[in-house]
Image (spheres, rainbow, N blue to C red):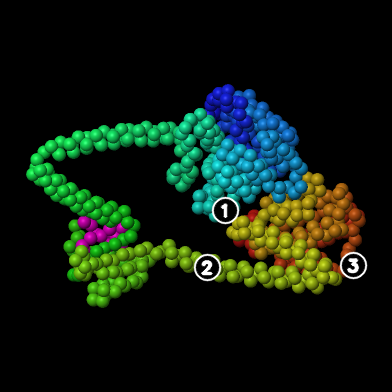
Amino acid sequence: MSEVGSESADGRRRAKAPLIIGVGASAGAMDSIERFFSRLALNSDQAIVLVLQRREAFDDGRLREMLQRPEGSRLSEIQDGAMIEGGTIYLCPVDRIATIQGGRLAIRGAAQAPGERATIDSFLVSLAEERAEEAIGVVLAGTGGDGTLGVETLKDHGGLAIAERVAGDHVDQLADSNHAAAIADYVLPPDQIPEHIQIYARHLRRLEERQGFEVPPARVADNKENNPNALVRPEHVERLESELLTTRERLQATIEELESTNEALKSSNEEYQALNEELATVNGELAHRVKELARATSDLKNFFEGTQIATVFLDNDLKVMNFTPAITQVLHLVETDVGRPIAQIKARIPIEELYDDVRRVLRTLASAERELSAPDSGTRYVVRILPYRSIGNFIAGVVITFIDVTAITRAEERQRLLLAELQHRVRNTLGVIRSIARRSAETSSSVDEYAAHLDGRLNAFARTQALVIRDPEGGVDLEYLVIEELLGYNAREGEQLRVSGPQVRFQSKAAETFALALHELATNALKYGALSQPSGRIEISWRIDEAVNPPRLVFDWRERNGPSVAPPPRKGFGTELLERTLAFEFKGQTMMMFNAGGLHCTIIIPLSRRTIHTPVLDS
């Protein structure tokens, strides 16, 4: 481990309140936490408050092992009303919201459910309001929108906000998101964040030590990809001061020289002075004109070499006057071709189609535009022809530009395909929703029952759509379908729920139907089955039966320790969906046994490419 920063604080600094660094992280970011703390050297005038989403999901032993520091810093649970001490890492307790008030830590019970508490936002907002520019906030990956408000408040109060950069994220993509990384001062990998914390801490110490010259934490524009908001280093400020002092001394010396020269000129005779003044004026004007001409020539040369637009200049006889380097993508031109007729130049496009347009532009002085395609590569160009006006404002030829629009054309074609696909999917979705609404109405005895059934089934359908959208081409994982459905009913995995089986991914359309079947089984378990009692359990498993041809997916739903169940007096929407819809959609078979300990349902589905994405089936 390489430590970043060094402990350098005098007695006056130790007497002050420590610099507080608020760190927000989630249970899915253990690797980010480890990388961050492995590079951190915590000074005695600094304290860290680690706020964790769903701390109950962390391995407490591993977490504490990662947070132990070799330099002797302490690890402490937050106590309500405790003063913040330097050299300490504070942990927010489980199911608590931590804030800072009057230089002391405060905790309170979390009234919201996990995932809705804004644990990180609460602490960072209080830190920003308490310490202003002497506050540092770090938001690691995986926290979702929690932390965004805190980062915004830190920036409003002059503090430093840093977010973790996730591999694959682009600055343009982040700018359109609602995550903390979209507005943070820094977006960095976790192992680079400690270095910038120590740089900012040293910057704050320098500001306190300076007398009579305050320098706010300015930011300079840097490469947007690598470091969009880098802090101006104090060494840069000192260098600027030194350069300013040197410039002022040179300016003073120049002024003194001018005064001496003026005195010498005044002592000369009037004729010599007039002659010198006239010569100086002529020389100045001539130098100015030469400089302007050189700059114009340089600008034109750089423009020709730097522009990515293929351009050729032709005179009135259609001979080449000049061209940009990019024209070689369209015409086989070299420097020795200047003065040759364009008809003698080999082209990658049918340029002879442009001759009539060129003559019409020379005759009417109106611009012309058309599209041409390269027969070999299929590259499409928009060709624009404009009159070429000389310095004397007479027409000396034409300017022809070739703009490659191949990518735009292909994007438009793809957009039309995507729109057609979207319209097809919307029609299918509306058809499913209409079917659910109609069948729910037919099997409901009251408006309230109809509303409850319709709401639950539409929610199940919406969850499936969310899984489909995540990977439209990759199918929907069966395990995700089961977990997403049952966790919505607060079924605790490991206590009330046990799920096992090989990897199986449904095609999108098949996933929608099977998700509705899972919803009906889960709703029945909540109302009448195992989930209606605290001691109830549901065991869900599936396997691939390859002993038959074609192979079959055997899905088993078994409820235990629930109330005694009996066949329903009438077949509602759920029963018809399990017995008839699955048989129609999948050519499957459903068997339900109403046992004393709970429902036992077995669903058998023949594997086919229409229903199953994974495993891949042979022809």
The residue under label 2 is 417
Mark closest to the chain's N terminus, 3 or 1: 1
Quadrant where the N terminus sits is top right
Amino acid bearing label 3: Pro
Q: Secondary structure at mark 1?
A: loop
Q: Mark 2 and mark 3 in contact? Answer it, CB < 8 Å.
A: no
Q: Residues within 10 Å of mark 3 (few under 14, many from 20)?
A: few
Task: Report the amino acid beneath label 1.
Answer: Ser
Q: Nearer the viewer, residue 338 or 98?
A: 98
Determine which residue is flagged by label 3.
569
Question: Can the viewer see residue 165 in this picture?
Answer: no
**Among the two numbered marks 2 and 3 on one chain, the one whose residue lies closer to the N terminus:** 2
**Label 3, label 1: how many angstroms apart (C-alpha)?**
52 Å
Horizontal and vertical percent for residue 150? 62, 45
Looking at the rendered image, the disc whose residue lies closer to the viewer, 2 or 1, is 1
In the figure, 469 relative to 161: above or below?
Answer: below
Tag on residue 73? none
Tag 3's secondary structure?
A: loop
Is 321 one of the magenta-colored residues? yes
For residue 17, side relative to residue 387 (left or right): right
